Image (tube, helix red, strand yellow):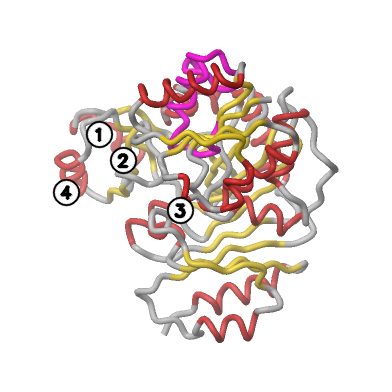
């Protein structure tokens, strides 16, 4: 199979997807804007060829690159970056070059939060109330129904960009005066904790890997308040979370695709409320957390699904795994050396975070694991404890 891997150098750990593709026999055709000599050696070794464009946002350049690959290697069997940012660009290229996978006509429900709500309702999954609102007076009428606080955000967006929690009419007015000139959605604010259902489907839509995570804070709060975050994976997935996730997979008819579904678990009623879907792996180092939890290689498993429509072996969640981020601006009780000395037997990875990811994940991150939850929880608390 000729497989085009899009923007292969970012995020930094995603080079492993290209390594996996080569391992399972694909001709890996890299398409990116980073000069070849700046690519890490593992990427260079995995490529059959690498095509550099000046601007990844210049669609004509991308079309020329795809045309070159097709002329030289024949039919392209797949294209992906496993990155939400490029979802629309990749869909356009798939549609234009007749490549299997998500097509342009399928994007609305995957990109627009208002459309996601419609799919959630069809799937029978509870959803937070919300609607597209363009006028200040319409927002006031919506708030009469749901009350403050509310969340305002672009209907189509990535991460927490231009996403704000609004507490009163003054903040609402400022939001309307400064928000981008794009369709925006307003939602009731659900008082609850964020949980996610994450995994991978095969080419027939069967669920071949899944897990779940609990988060200390949402991305909106972390970015807007410049705080730090931790999140951890379970060994046993809450039953209602798995049921809701499976319903959403079926409703979206996901095939050979990673997914990251976000929910609120209501503090008072403990029920789940669907927030949004992302048709890619959860961000940061979460794919590596998959591996540390199960002692397997999710990058290889994805490549095997793409190439052969199967995984290498059944998975089992052997460990709880947690990511704990720290920001340089804060003064922590434990120094980095203290953390390594005290919890080195539980830490499986630690590293600096790329600048683009730092506002959400912190400037430095630790991945820790344990077969029991309480020691993991205690370690996380101490790693992030501030003076």
Q: Which residue is mark 3?
A: 218
Q: Which residue is mark 1?
A: 139
Distance, label 2 to label 4, CA atoms, is 14 Å
Image disc number at residue 170: 4
The 10 Å Cα crowd at callout 2, few under 14, some 14 to 19, many 20 or more, is: many
- Tell whether label 2 touches label 1 (CB within 8 Å): yes
**Label 4 or label 1, whichever comes before in sequence order:** 1
**Label 1 or label 3, whichever comes before in sequence order:** 1
Distance, label 4 to label 3, CA atoms, is 24 Å
**Label 2 or label 4, whichever comes before in sequence order:** 2
Of circles 4 and 3, the one toward us is: 3
Image disc number at residue 152: 2
Instruction: Identify the secondary structure beneath mark 3.
Output: loop
The 10 Å Cα crowd at callout 3, few under 14, some 14 to 19, many 20 or more, is: some
Instruction: Identify the secondary structure beneath mark 2.
Output: strand
Question: Which residue is rendered at x = 34% and y = 32% of the image?
Answer: 57
Distance, label 4 to label 1, CA atoms, is 13 Å
**Label 4 or label 3, whichever comes before in sequence order:** 4
Residue 83 part of the magenta segment: yes
Of circles 1 and 3, the one toward us is: 3
First to last magenta residue range: 80-105
């Amino acid at each position: 199979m000729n497989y085009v891997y899009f923007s292969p150098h970012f995020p930094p750990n995603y080079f492993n997807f290209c390594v996996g593709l080569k391992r399972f026999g694909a001709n890996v055709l890299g398409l990116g804007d980073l000069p070849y000599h700046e690519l890490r050696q593992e990427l260079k070794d995995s490529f059959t060829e690498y095509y550099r464009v000046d601007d990844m946002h210049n669609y004509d350049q991308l079309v020329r690159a795809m045309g070159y690959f097709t002329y030289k290697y024949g039919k392209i069997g797949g294209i992906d970056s496993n990155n939400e940012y490029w979802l629309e660009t990749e869909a356009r290229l798939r549609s234009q070059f007749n490549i299997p996978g998500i097509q342009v006509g399928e994007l609305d429900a995957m990109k627009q939060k208002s459309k996601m709500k419609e799919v959630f309702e069809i799937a029978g999954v509870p959803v937070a109330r919300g609607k597209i609102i363009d006028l200040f007076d319409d927002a006031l009428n919506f708030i009469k129904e749901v009350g403050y606080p509310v969340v305002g955000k672009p209907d189509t967006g990535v991460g927490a960009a231009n996403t704000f929690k609004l507490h009163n009419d003054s903040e609402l007015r400022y939001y309307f005066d400064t928000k981008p000139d794009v369709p925006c959605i307003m939602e009731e604010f659900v008082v609850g904790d964020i949980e996610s259902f994450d995994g991978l489907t095969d080419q027939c839509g069967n669920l071949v890997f899944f897990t779940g995570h609990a988060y200390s804070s949402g991305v909106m709060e972390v970015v807007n308040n410049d705080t730090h975050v931790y999140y951890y994976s379970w060994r046993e997935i809450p039953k209602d979370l798995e049921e809701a996730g499976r319903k959403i997979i079926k409703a979206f008819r996901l095939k050979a695709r990673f997914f990251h579904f976000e929910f609120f678990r209501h503090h008072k009623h403990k029920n789940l409320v669907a927030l949004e879907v992302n048709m890619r792996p959860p961000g940061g180092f979460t794919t590596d957390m998959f591996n540390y939890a199960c002692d397997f290689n999710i990058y290889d498993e994805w490549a095997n699904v793409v190439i052969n429509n199967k995984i290498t072996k059944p998975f089992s969640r052997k460990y709880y795994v947690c990511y704990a981020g720290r920001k340089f601006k804060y003064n922590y009780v434990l120094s980095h050396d203290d953390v390594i000395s005290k919890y080195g037997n539980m830490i499986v990875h630690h590293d600096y975070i790329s600048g683009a990811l730092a506002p959400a994940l912190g400037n430095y991150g630790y991945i820790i694991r344990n077969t029991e939850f309480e020691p993991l929880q205690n370690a996380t608390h101490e790693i992030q404890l501030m003076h």
